Amino acid sequence: MMLALALSVFTIGSYLVWPSRWNIPAHFQLAFVIPAYVIPVLMTNALSQYPRDLLALFVPLLEVGAGFYIVGMVCGSALPRMKLTRWPFTFTSLSEPELIAFASRQAIWLGLFSILGMVVSFRVMGFVPMFAADPMVAKYLRGSYQDSYRNVAVLLRSSEQIIFLTVPIMAVLYYVTRRKLFALIGVLQLALQALTLSRGLFGAPLVTGLGLIAVSRGYKAFIMYLTLLVFAVVAASASTYYAARLLLPEFAQIEQGTVWENIASGAPDIPQTLDFMAAFERRPQWTYGRTFVGGLIPFHYRWNPDIWSLAVEASDEDLDINTVISGGLRLPPPVMGYTAFGWPGAIIVCLLSGLATGYGAVFARRYVGPGSLVSSVIALSLYNTAVLQFVEFYSISIYTVFTIFVAFMFAYRVEVRSSARTSGD
C-alpha cells in the first residue's frame, strides 16, 4: 500500500496544491492510478514475484522520493510569481469576443495543418498503423516501418503534437460558439490520431476538452464525467490484454488470468519498473544526467530515456530497438534520479520536480476556473505543455518542446510595430 501511495503522489500530487474540480490533468491521472498502481498492488500478487532485497530498495526509494516531492510542492506553491516576458497573456488582456476571435484563427489554421500533415505522412509512409500488416509493430514504427517513417518524422510528430494541443481548444470553441467547423476539424483530428493506435495522444486531448466543459456545468456533470473517465480508463486497460492476444501471434497462447490481472496488464508500470531496477542493480551504469537531455536528439539516440530504459531492462547496451514492441518505460522520478546520481540524485530530482509542480499548480489554480472557458482552456494548454515539461525535466523530449511553442501561439499575441524616426532637418 505504501508503494501504491508513493507512486500516486507523483501522478496526482497536484491535488494537494490545486484541490479543485478544475484540475483536469489530475483527474485524468487519477483514472490511470487505479489500473496502474491500486489494482496491481492490492488485487494481484505481482509483487510476490520479485525478491525481497529488490523491494527493500525500491519501496524506500519511492517513499523518500515522494516525501521530498511533497516538500518541493509546498515550497513551490509559496514562491513569488515571476513574469517571464513583457507581453501579457491573451487570456488576461483580451476581452472575451477578442479572445474567441484570436483563438479561433489560431485553432483553425493549426487544425487544418495537422490534418493535412497526418494525411501526407500516411501517404508518404505508405501505411496506416491501424491497417498495417503488423499493427503493433507499425504503432511503434519499428522494423520494416522505420525507414519510411524517417522521411516524414518531423511532419508526423509535429502534426500529432498540434492535435494534442488544439483538440481541447476546438471542443471548447465549439461549445461556446456552436460553429460546426470546430467540431468537424476536431473530429477529423481525433479520427486521424486514432489511426496511429496511440492511446495517450488520442485520449488525453479528448478528456481535457470534455472535462473542462463538464466541470463548467456544475458538480453533477463533473461527478458523471469523473465516473465515466475512471470506467473508460479501466476498460481500456483491460481491453489491451485481449487486443494483444488477437493482434500479436506470440501472445495468442497466453492463459487468461483473473479480471484484475487483465486490467493490470494494460498499465504494467510497476512490473516494468521492478524489472528495470533488477536489471540496473545487476549491472549499474550511472547516467550522470545524460538521459535528462537525451530526448532532444531524435532517431533512437542511446541516451533517449525511452531507448535507454528498454536497453537497461533487456540488459543489452546494443539493443536493436526495432526488435522491441514498446515505446519505452514510464519510470517514476526517484528512479530517474537514482540511476543518474544514486540516492542524492533521487532526492534532488524529486525535490525539483515537486517545486515545479507546486509553482505550476498555483498558476493553473489562478487562471483555470469559473468564468471564461476559452481563457481556461488556453491557460490549461500552457500548463499541460510548458509547466509539465518543467515538472518532468528528467525526461524532456524534442516533441514536447515543439508543443510548448504551439501553446505560446495561443497564450501570447505578439505584434510587430515599425517605429518611424524623424531626422533633424
Image: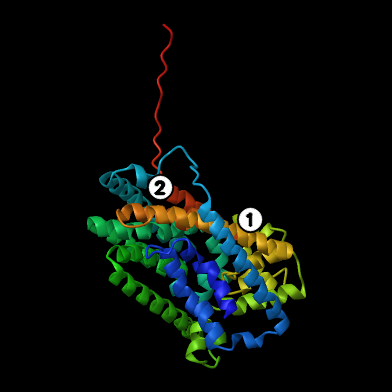
Measured as percent of width and height from the top left, residue 206 is found at 37, 66
The kind of residue tagged 1 is Val
Which residue appears at 44% of the width and 47% of the height?
A: 408
Question: On the picture, is 232 further left or further right than 248?
Answer: left
Residue with the mark numbered 2: 411
The answer to which quarter of the image holds residue 336 is bottom right
Q: Residue 342: x and y, percent? A: 73, 65
Place residue 119 in its image quadrant.
bottom left
On-image quarter of the C terminus: top left
Q: In this figure, which residue is indicated by the disc labeled 1?
A: 293
Image quadrant where one finds the N terminus: bottom right
Is 90 positioned to the left or the right of 33 in the image? Answer: left
Q: Is residue 421 visible?
A: yes
Lower position in the chain sequence, tag 2 or tag 1? 1
Q: Are marks 2 and 1 in contact (CB under 8 Å)?
A: no
> Which one is nearer the viewer's eye here, 67 or 125?
67
Residue at the top extreme?
425
